[in-house]
Image (cartoon, helix red, strand yellow):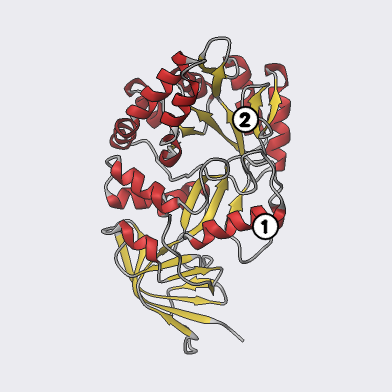
Amino acid sequence: MSSIIEFSGPILTGPDREHRGLWSVDGFLTFDRPPAAPDLVLDGWVLPGLVDAHCHIGLGPDGDVPDVVAEAQALTDRDAGTLLVRDAGAVHDTRWLQRRPDMPRIIRSGRHIARTRRYLRGFAVEVEPEDLVEAVRKQARAGDGWVKLVGDWIDRDAGDLAPSFPARALRDAVQAAHDEGVRVTAHCFAEDTLDGMLDAGIDCIEHATGLLPRHLPRFVEQGVPIVPTLINIATFPDIAARADARFPRYAAHMRSLWERRAERILEAYEAGVGIYTGTDAGSVIQHGRIIDEVEALHDAGLPARAALDAGTWAARAWLGADGISEGASADVLVCAEDPRLNLGTLRQLRQIVLRGEPIGGSNPSN
């Protein structure tokens, strides 16, 4: 017996495109009215499920977490409207969650790859430059099309941020990943780190707090997007305060990166750099905060419509995932108002539909 949902409100198939008439039949979207009557009619503005393109389901403050914690993290994200996650590095093997039809879709990246003793303890595979290519090949085969590098971290001898790997090692590592058929993204805070990443042919930059006007033409020319994780960057002043006594240069650097965060994002947007939403949930940042990130992009200067695009249609296209199209999985949200005009409506969703199954509206984000 087929299951049919009718969506009776405006259907947002893109940031500037509206449609009328959409149904879910046995979990798949169609614009053609089915012959049978619907089992459920949902009224409201319909858009694709939100995308968290930098999330760590299966990661906690000390690294790996029990299954019950990973499950709770995934459910929290789902209930906030995140129906697609690009994992940006986790110790926990979340393939069992991928098999759960009630869980968000997860694109896994394997574990972080960092320089020895140059990252958070228990998070990453830690290697020296001569072993970077081998580590990249291994994590490429363990994930779903992405590898995550830690591009820079505090160098305690220098007392400041410094690149994790030399330029030649980065170039070889990125080439190895591409040979394996996967893309590479990198955690990057500092300004100079970005030059080496662009030279290496990186596919994406996480955080990008060191983005300068001189970098913008290369980001555009090479088609390299950024995932700013602004709600994580909001923690930089606290990080700086804890570092003041031992590493004052690093502390000052982190404050300066934080101070120009909004300017950096607006410059990137106006230059045509791709920007996508990511919360960095999983260690310090709580899960379920994707709407905070969408609003943070808007607060940084992006029009509301562009901020929403960064977390829905554009993000899905970039990751190779369906939005709202004929035959796509019915992974959609139903809002009381047009979310392109009022981002706040995302905090009180009328309905979340995942794989054609209604799972209820979300609670307000905290």
- Image coords of residue 311 (percent x, y): 42, 51
- Residue type at mark 2: give it: Leu
Q: Give the SS element for disc 1.
A: helix
* Residue 83 horizontal side relative to residue 225, left or right: right
**Quadrant into which the C terminus falls:** bottom left
- Label 2: which residue? 120
In the image, residue 175 sits, relative to residue 274, either above or below, namely above
Marks 2 and 1 sit apart, C-alpha to C-alpha, by 25 Å
Q: Which circle marks residue 184 in the picture? A: none
**Quadrant into which the N terminus falls:** bottom right
> Residue reaching furthest top?
157
- Image coords of residue 14 (percent x, y): 36, 58
- Displayed quadrant of residue 122: top right
Residue 202 in sight = yes
Tell me what residue is drawn at x 35 percent, y 44 percent: 296
Q: Give the SS element for disc 2.
A: loop
Q: Earlier in the sequence, mark 2 or mark 1?
A: 1
Mark 2 burial class by Cα count in 10 Å: few <14, some 14-19, many 20+: few
- Residue type at mark 1: give it: Leu
Q: Which residue is nearer to you in this view: 167 or 302?
A: 302
Single out the mark in the foreground, 2 or 1: 2
Total numbered circles: 2
- Label 1: which residue? 97
- Image coords of residue 267 (percent x, y): 29, 32
> Residue reaching furthest front?
245
In the image, residue 47 sits, relative to residue 172, either above or below, namely below
Mark 1 burial class by Cα count in 10 Å: few <14, some 14-19, many 20+: some
Residue 33 in sight = no
In the image, residue 276 sits, relative to residue 362, either above or below, namely above
